[in-house]
Amino acid sequence: MQAPYQQNYALRMSLFYAGFFFPYGIYVPFFAVWLKSLDFGAEAIGMVLTIPMIARVIFTPLMAAISDKIGDRRLALRIYCTFYGLSFALITLSDSLVWIGLVMAVSHIAQSAIIPVSDSLALAGTRRFGLDYGRMRSSGTFAFLLANLAGGLFMQTFGDNRLIWLLVAGNMLHILFSMPLPIDPRRIDNRSLAKGTRLDWNQLKQFAQASFWMILISASLIQASHSMLYSFSAIYWNRIGISSNMTGLLWSMASVSEIILFRYSKKISARFNWKALMLIAAVIAIVRWATFPLELPIYGYLLLQVLHAGSFGCAHLGAMFFINELVDDEISGTAQGLYTMLTGLLSAFATTASGFLYAELNGLAFLSMSLVGLVALALLLLSGVFPLTRIRADERE
């Protein structure tokens, strides 16, 4: 018989991931299209899309560490989701570039920490109860898939300029689905919120390992190599004659492949360790972005989108398994925050560059992302030269 705290843990996490990734599945492929409908140029679009990534760099480590400090990730997520959902809604008050940029900056102070903290809570369930992280996370990808299709159909029916209303409504799901989140296992152990987790130098100095940072940077570079896809794929596909509905289908194919990967992640992890998964991701990213600008027929882009399971999914699982294996649960939120910070920093550079590169090169700009994947592969291979030790919550001088 399951312990009371184990019951519905996976279901509650799955619902939360679905609530978060539905609006994200609208934002990623179509937010740039909405900005374009406001007559913003490629450079301006790239700058706006960079703002959330800069917020991740500045605020994610702090917000993730706060969730570790108070010792209750569920409470932290409820606060962060409420702040994000309500503050992002202010974007509807004006269509000026300055106002949109300001709302993006303020709202993403909290949004930047939602994924690392929720991943930390989900991975705590895998440690405590032997749950399957990939299956929990796959519900988010399924919601992302539905959002891809819904966003394409919505724009086809109501126009690009009204997409923001669907996105704002979707963001309210953050608040709704944060309410039934499972109790933090740290609270099961009756740890006081007032005491929380003692984050001190003895703990934090353990992160100062060359191999740890090289691996995290490699994973972040692989994720950053998707920046051109996230920012300009819909615009690029539209330029070569692919409709919004078909763009939604292309994105849904990426989601389907990712769902399949996550559903079988436990079996995959038994065969491939975190490093093998990241190596696979880097190689696939190199091939995917080198092929993207060839103006392929529809079935060609469908195949490239299926590779999302490799370039994104394997990199994500590899990073999660790496942190889960190397870092104690009590400070896993901090580790997740560091990873998200790095991903935000490198993605910010890549997204800003994407705007300028796409303005000059159009589809050929995707080749630059292949070079990013190549650097990630080199770093990952070099990381094996340096020692790597477990990062513990109770480390002492």
Image: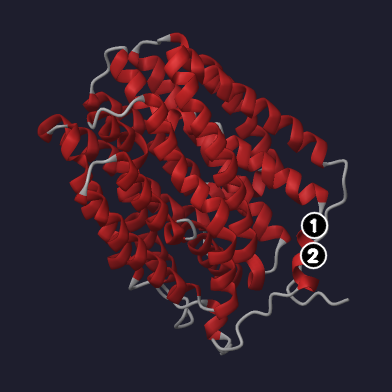
Q: Nearer the viewer, residue 34 or 335?
A: 34
Q: Which residue is mark 2?
A: 205
The structure residue drawn at horizontal position 42% and vertical position 64%, both measured from the top left corner, is 13
* Three-letter code, disc 1: Ala
Q: In the rendering, at what x and y percent does residue 329 appear?
A: 64, 70
The structure residue drawn at horizontal position 56% and vertical position 55%, both measured from the top left corner, is 58
In the displayed structure, 90 sits above or below 155; it is: below
Would you say residue 273 is visible in this rendering? no
- Marks 1 & 2, CB-CB < 8 Å contact: yes
Q: In the rendering, at what x and y percent does residue 73 appear?
A: 50, 73
Q: Which residue is mark 1?
A: 208
Q: Quadrant of the C terminus?
A: bottom right
The structure residue drawn at horizontal position 49% and vertical position 82%, both measured from the top left corner, is 3
Q: Quadrant of residue 201?
A: bottom right
Give the SS element for disc 1: loop
The structure residue drawn at horizontal position 63% and vertical position 49%, both measured from the top left corner, is 319
Q: Nearer the viewer, residue 252 or 341?
A: 341
Q: Nearer the viewer, residue 377 or 112?
A: 112
Which residue is farthest left? 157
